[in-house]
Amino acid sequence: MEILVLLAVVVIIGALLGGKSFGGTVRKGCGFLIMLLILGVIAIAIFYYSRTDTEGQEAISTTENSTNYIAKENCSTYSKPDIESTSEGSLEIGKNYFVKDNDKFNYFYEITFQNGVKLFVRKECLERK
C-alpha cells in the first residue's frame, strides 16, 4: 500500500514538473524527491553543527581582569543569568573557565567562549583556582 502511495506522489510531482511521458514523469518525480532528501540532510547537518552547545568549546580570557575558575561539577549553562532561561549545555567537570567580572551578577558567572558565545553558569558550580 505504501509503495502505491509513494508511486502516486512521484507521478503527481513529476506531472507538475512537466513530465511528457510516464517514464519522464516518474524520472522527474524521483529526481525531485531525491533533491528534497539531499536538501533535508544538508539542512539538518547545518542545524546540528550550528547549535550553541558548549561541549568542546574552550573558554577564553578576554582581559587581564579575568579570574580563572574550575568546574566542581557538570553544571548547566544558561542563555541568560536566570535559572528559568533555556539551558544551553553544560560545563565539563575539572575544566578551567575564565570569568571576566565575577561580581557582575548575584548568582551567576558570565563565561565567554572562543566562538564569542556568552553563557551563564551558577556561581556554586565553579570554584576559584
Image: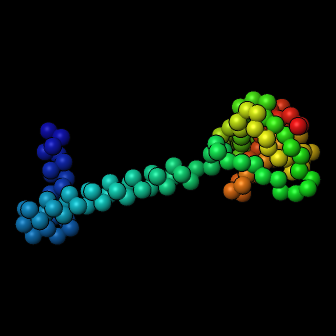
Q: Where residue 12 appears, x then y in whole percent?
A: 17, 58
Corner quadrant of residue 84: top right
**Of residues 25 and 126, the one drawn nearer to the viewer in this rendering:** 126
Q: Quadrant of the C terminus?
A: top right
Corner quadrant of residue 37: bottom left
Q: Is residue 16 above or below residue 127?
A: below
Q: Does the image show residue 21? A: yes
**Of residues 52 and 17, the one drawn nearer to the viewer in this rendering:** 52
Horizontal side, residue 114 vs residue 4: left or right: right
Q: Where residue 35 appears, x then y in whole percent?
A: 30, 60
**Of residues 88 and 73, the one drawn nearer to the viewer in this rendering:** 73
Tell me which residue sits at (83%, 43%) in the image.
Answer: 109
Tell me which residue sits at (38%, 54%) in the image.
Answer: 40
Tell me which residue sits at (70%, 36%) in the image.
Answer: 92
Tell me which residue sits at (8%, 62%) in the image.
Answer: 23
Q: Where residue 50 appears, x then y in whole percent?
A: 56, 54
Q: Is residue 31 above or below residue 88?
A: below
Horizontal side, residue 95 vs residue 37: left or right: right
Colouring mode (rainbow / by chain / secondary structure / one colour): rainbow
Horizontal side, residue 25 vs residue 128: left or right: left
Q: Where residue 69 appears, x then y in whole percent?
A: 84, 40
How many numbered discs sit on the rendered protein? 0
